[in-house]
Image (tube, rainbow, N blue to C red):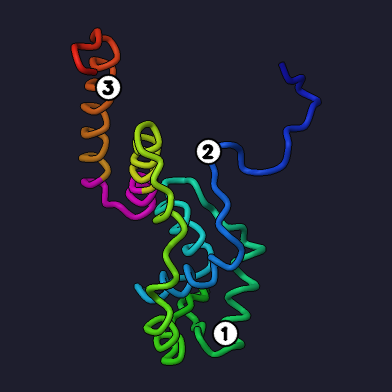
């Protein structure tokens, strides 16, 4: 048992994955190929799409964005105080040439079983965060009703004895 003064080992714990070194470069370009995004939005997108299994640090994302901008593959623009990035023509050409080789890291993780349940839960959590931040009051009310029903169905599932084949 850990005592409160003991420190946990550094890292993200057993449920997180580390992407291979350099995977973030192609992944960033692929995401920016979908739409312009600012740095924090990219980090959040990585986390949501990976079901919470991969969240690159700002210390890896922002310097890489600056490097990609220096290389002419992306450019930033002012958007009301935010600094989103978009692909340049050279960035689009790079993506067209290398896009198939730069799979998003979580596309290679196929946990199956309980991992699928965790991934789906992470995706749902990401969608709820988006609804909480950007959803209308009516959308938030509908989401609440869906969650109340889902919670009750899960309680019912846990309370029922397993049937044959489960």
In which quadrant of the rendered view does residue 117 lie? top left
- Front-most of 3 and 118? 118
Disc number placed over residue 69 in the picture, else none: 1
Residue, disc 3: 154
What range is drawn magenta here? 127-139
* Of callouts 1 and 2, the N-terminal one: 2
As drawn, is 35 to the left or to the right of 147?
A: right
Local secondary structure at mark 2? loop
Disc number placed over residue 15 in the picture, else none: 2
In the image, is residue 153 above or below residue 64? above
As drawn, is 86 to the left or to the right of 112?
A: right
- Front-most of 45 and 117? 117
Residues packed near mark 3 inside 10 Å, few (<14), some (14 to 19) or many (20 plus): few
Q: Farthest residue in the right direction?
A: 5
Residue 113: give x, y in percent of width and height: 35, 33
- Give the label, 3 or 2, closer to the camera: 2
- Front-most of 165 and 12? 165
Residue depicted at 41% across the width and 81% down the height: 95
Disc number placed over residue 159 in the picture, else none: none
């Amino acid at each position: 048992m850990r005592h409160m003064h003991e420190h946990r080992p550094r890292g993200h714990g057993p449920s997180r994955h580390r992407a291979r070194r350099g995977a973030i470069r192609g992944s960033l370009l692929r995401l920016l190929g979908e739409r312009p995004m600012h740095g924090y939005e990219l980090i959040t997108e990585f986390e949501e799409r990976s079901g919470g299994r991969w969240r690159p640090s700002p210390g890896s994302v922002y310097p890489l964005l600056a490097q990609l901008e220096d290389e002419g593959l992306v450019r930033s623009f002012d958007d009301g105080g935010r600094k989103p990035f978009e692909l340049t023509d050279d960035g689009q050409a790079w993506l067209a040439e290398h896009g198939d080789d730069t799979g998003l890291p979580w596309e290679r993780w196929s946990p199956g079983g309980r991992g699928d349940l965790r991934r789906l839960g992470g995706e749902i959590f990401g969608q709820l965060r988006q609804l909480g931040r950007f959803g209308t009051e009516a959308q938030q009310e509908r989401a609440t009703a869906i969650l109340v029903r889902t919670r009750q169905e899960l309680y019912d599932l846990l309370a029922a004895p397993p049937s044959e084949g489960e």
